[in-house]
Amino acid sequence: MGMLQKIAMENKTGRQIGVFSVCTSNQLVIRAALRHAGKRGYPLVLEATSNQCNQFGGYTGMTPKDYMDMVHHLAEEEGCPASQLILGGDHLGPLVSCHKPEREAMKDAADMIRAYAAAGFGKIHIDTSMRLGDDDPRQPLAPEVCARRAAELALVVRETCRALPDAEQPVLVVGSEVPIPGGSLVHEDSVTPTSPVEIARQIAAFREAFAQKGLPFGQVIGFVAQPGVEFGDDFVNAYAPRRAAGLMAQMRGCPDLVLEGHSTDYQTRESLSSLVRDGVAILKVGPALTFALREALMLAQQAAGRMGVNVDFTGALENAMLADDRYWKSYYSGTEREVAYKRLFSFSDRCRYYLPDPGVEQAVQTLLTQCGDLPPALLSLYFPRQYTKYRNGQLGSDLRTVILDRIGDVLDDYAAACFPALYE
């Protein structure tokens, strides 16, 4: 039994244990996660999303194999043992080709899934929840359609791994009620959890679709549903255990599946702990981490200015976003002033798509190379939590270390929810 299966089954017994999956391609965030996990010794799931890394390169320019190589290289540099790592693919399916008719979109999806499986990823989230070019836009996509398409892609995974010597079959996560990647497009005062009847219908549809393809459903360890958490441009819906009680009770009667919670970004430590306790054994986080990175870099820019190092990271980020609006235009609305604010400070964190921009990367590198150690007074002013660790001899004061630890403040909440013994 693999590491993920073991944790999932322990969660099913009622134990407060789970895993969280860091969904990002940003190297500083990945370094922060590797450093955090390496220091504390827990299993870390790192996932690339389908729009970040695919057979076409994604918006990062990386294929799944490139992502795999990058993570292993960074893990070696950060001292995180490979035995602690599980690499995954997030929202793998026809998402990046959903404007095409089913035949073409599913071919692209199969090619992408094949690339992830061949690269050796140990966890694959198959997402077929989106309408394709020839689906009726006036009708909701039936779970049976999602399940059929997911089974087709699961078969690609199985056949790819069988054709490779010594390749292990990855664990799968499926589901048809999948939150929008990157957060909601509209303001939502609350989100209704998936009903017990609906989750039972969805799971039955996926079991049947797998059976028709001759696939063992035991490879599926997680199911994506809506436990009632979401975030968007200007809001965060906190987890409310009482509202999700029916969903959780239904899942407790399903001995071989745990829930995978998407859009758990910005939840409090208490909410994350409640999610794990109630059976959401896999927590996804991504934008909250790049949000924390952006905060840290803006603070670093201010501290650098006090030291006589003038680097306009914020200006470089704004310039990149104004030069290419495709990653934020449809997310932000309002007056010119309101949209300008949202570009940099929205919880949707669309500015994460622009961190790989050459001008932005140059600003970040200039900050990291020219600032060196932060004086204690500036560390106290701009990074008070890190200052406390510095005074206690637990942390250095060089800017890179401080920024990675600032991202680690968010990782602490997830690690405490999944591995509470580490924080006792």
Image (spheres, rainbow, N blue to C red):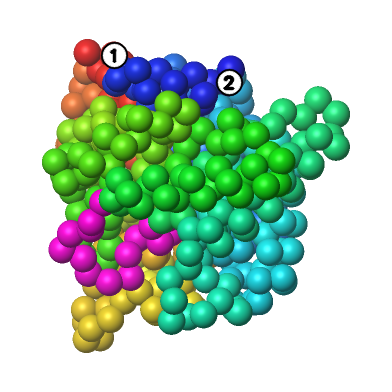
How packed mark 2 is, by other alpha carbons closer than 10 Å (few <14, some 14-19, many 20 or more), is few
Q: Amino acid at mark 1?
A: Ala
Q: Residue at x 35, y 74 (%)?
A: 331
Span shown in magenta: 178-193
Left or right: residue 282 compared with residue 416:
right
**Circle 1 is placed at which residue position?**
421
Residue 131, how many percent across, how many down? 52, 71
Q: Residue at x 43, y 59 (%)?
A: 181
Number of the label disc, if any, that sits on residue 8: none
Circles 2 and 1: CB atoms closer than 8 Å? no
Q: Secondary structure at mark 1?
A: helix
Q: Is residue 269 above or below residue 142?
A: above
Q: Quadrant of residue 272?
A: top left
**Circle 2 is placed at which residue position?**
2
Select label 2 or label 1 by which is in front: 2
Judged by its main secondary structure, the magenta piece is loop
Q: Amino acid at mark 2?
A: Gly
Instruction: Name the foreground residue: 189 vs 333.
Output: 189
Instruction: Name the foreground residue: 206 vs 69.
Output: 206
Quadrant of the image for the C terminus?
A: top left
Q: Is residue 377 above or below residue 145?
A: above
Q: Residue at x 28, y 42 (%)?
A: 247
Q: Earlier in the sequence, mark 2 or mark 1?
A: 2
Instruction: Name the foreground residue: 178 vs 347.
Output: 178
Q: Secondary structure at mark 2?
A: loop
Q: Quadrant of residue 254?
A: top left
